[in-house]
Amino acid sequence: MPVSLAGPSSGPPHTSFEIKSAQLPLVTLLVKTNDWNVLASELTQQFGAGGETPEFFDHDALVVDFSHLDTSTPATDLVPLLKILRSCNLVPVAIRGASAHWTASAREIGLVEASAEVHRPRPPSDVPPPNSEPVIREVIQEVIKEVPGPVTMVVDKPLRSGQKIYARGADLVVLAMVNQGAEVVADGNIHVYAPLRGKAMAGARGNTNARIFSLCLEPELISIAGIYRTSENALAPDVQGKAAQVRLSNDGQDKLLIEALKI
């Protein structure tokens, strides 16, 4: 499922790139400009050490996709681009969709060429084809093994401005207020059983099924899998300051849906 870093409904703030989460921890950067200064400014503003979400990536392997650049775009030095990406905790390993000149330049600095699509093998069918010989199957005794449930981090104290909680690989449950200037981040869902007035980022590593729940939604910023909305775009009266949930649409448009909770 592609994950674009789109902003409020007025339009996406980033025009030079798009991030897509593939099979984690592999990430794809869709490059839309060969002006590394523009790209550096937008990437560092979002993911750099002093950006909005500096811990969004954790040395994830990255494929740089040039398919949105015109084939006539002249190849430039890729070393500055790699430095920008590494400063955002990304590890470039391959390129795809590039012209021959771009590909040659990438190979010179150690990148490999990735295929356009990853074809997954079709699972074998249990039904034998017609006129096939009988198949002798080995009977294996079933072993029941208890599998631990999903991990959940619980925070029972108010979060002040400047504080940040990250539930890596887990859901996050907050039982107290998240004040303005505070951040709550989770790879899974976020539940705030109190006013949410700071920033909340669920599905931080690309989980598009993640959701945010709050008994009093008054956020500075809300984000699901990188799709975010800020307080500059006011919430509707039926959800502002009320019990609500935030999720992504399932129509392929990756839009943030903010809905009142009937409780």
Image (cartoon, helix red, strand yellow):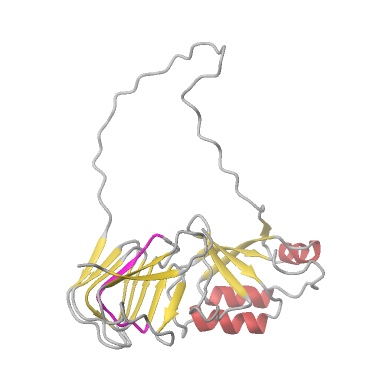
For residue 35, side relative to residue 244 (left or right): right
Q: List x then y, in percent, for residue 24.
A: 48, 57
Kindly indicate the quadrant of the structure image that contains residue 102.
bottom right
Q: Which residue is at the front of the view, 171 or 13?
A: 13
Task: Determine the residue positioned at 25% across, 49% down.
Answer: 148
For residue 119, side relative to residue 97 (left or right): left
Q: Which residue is at the front of the view, 256 or 66?
A: 256
For residue 111, side relative to residue 28 (left or right): right
Q: List x then y, in percent, for residue 240.
A: 31, 81
Task: Determine the residue positioned at 27% across, 58% down.
Answer: 151
Q: List x then y, in percent, for residue 6.
A: 52, 74
Q: Which residues are magenta?
A: 209-220
Q: Which residue is at the front of the view, 255 or 156?
A: 255
Q: List x then y, in percent, for residue 21.
A: 51, 61
Q: Split into 4 quadrants, where in the image is the C terminus?
A: bottom left
Task: Determine the residue positioned at 17% across, 74% down.
Answer: 156
Is 210 within the magenta? yes
Q: Which residue is at the front of the view, 63 or 72?
A: 72
Kindly indicate the quadrant of the structure image that contains residue 188.
bottom left
For residue 227, side relative to residue 41 (left or right): left
Is 159 within the magenta? no
Task: Determine the residue positioned at 59% across, 84% down.
Answer: 41
